[in-house]
Image (cartoon, rainbow, N blue to C red):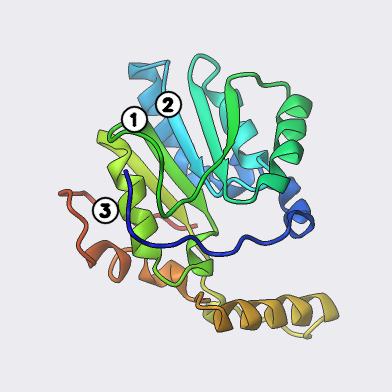
Amino acid sequence: MASKSSSEPAHPAPHAVHHEWRTAQNSASYLLPKINSMSEQNSKLKLLDVGAGSGSISATLAQLIPDGHITAIDINPDILPLARAVAEMVGVTNINFEQGDAHKLSYADESFDITICHQILFHLKEPWIVLREMMGVTKAGGIVGAREGDLDTECIWPELPGLLSFHNFAASMMKDGGTSTAGRQLLVDNCCRGLSKRVWLEKISP
């Protein structure tokens, strides 16, 4: 399903390495009951992970649907070998990694039962375009899941060097057109910008 928006620059692969600790259990727990329920009805679920990075969430999701299949995409081709290595380490084969632009997904409409992203919308100038693409490739009755942070709700003391470094990075990201408050905007801002399908929205925290 194509859109007219141009892609945005990806972060270099080394910046994604620290995401390898993420798993379906610690980073997509909101989704697990839905997957369990849907897999009882259809064991061959098809799931698309948009902006998969090093693939650790994708690979651990693949463990949960052994008869299904995961397609994981990232705009940065340099991260794909690492993602494949992570999947091999986890021991899953029902997954493939592809280079792809979230703004212009190359899949036919209604190709996937579940489409997800994790902490990518806050990097984007026009995240609603990506949400439209995700909805377009998801089957009617399927699930589109997005987990995004909201840094303005964070209050930590003392300000440790690592935290200061992270917030400096977030500030530079926002200068490039992203936002640190993507989490609060998911339902109101993004989903009201011309999405073509009638959808049921559910906000789940965390």
Instruction: Residue under label 1, please give it.
Output: 111
Q: Is residue 134 above or below residue 16?
A: above
Marking on residue 102 = none
In this image, 85 relative to 47: left or right? right
- Residue 16 screen position, x and y as percent: 72, 55
Amino acid type, label 3: Leu
Instruction: Residue under label 3, please give it.
Output: 201
Quadrant in the picture for the N terminus: top left
Labels 1 and 2 touching (C-beta < 8 A): yes
- Residue 49 screen position, x and y as percent: 51, 41
Q: Residue at x 59, y 49 (%)?
A: 27
Q: Please tell me whether mark 2 sits on a helix, a strand or a loop.
A: strand
Q: Please tell me whether mark 1 sits on a helix, a strand or a loop.
A: loop
Instruction: Residue under label 2, please give it.
Output: 46
Labels 2 and 3 touching (C-beta < 8 A): no
Q: Spatial distance from mark 2 to mark 3, Cα to Cα? A: 21 Å
Q: Is residue 117 above or below residue 185?
A: above
Q: Please tell me whether mark 3 sits on a helix, a strand or a loop.
A: loop
Q: Spatial distance from mark 3 to mark 1, Cα to Cα? A: 20 Å
Amino acid type, label 2: Lys
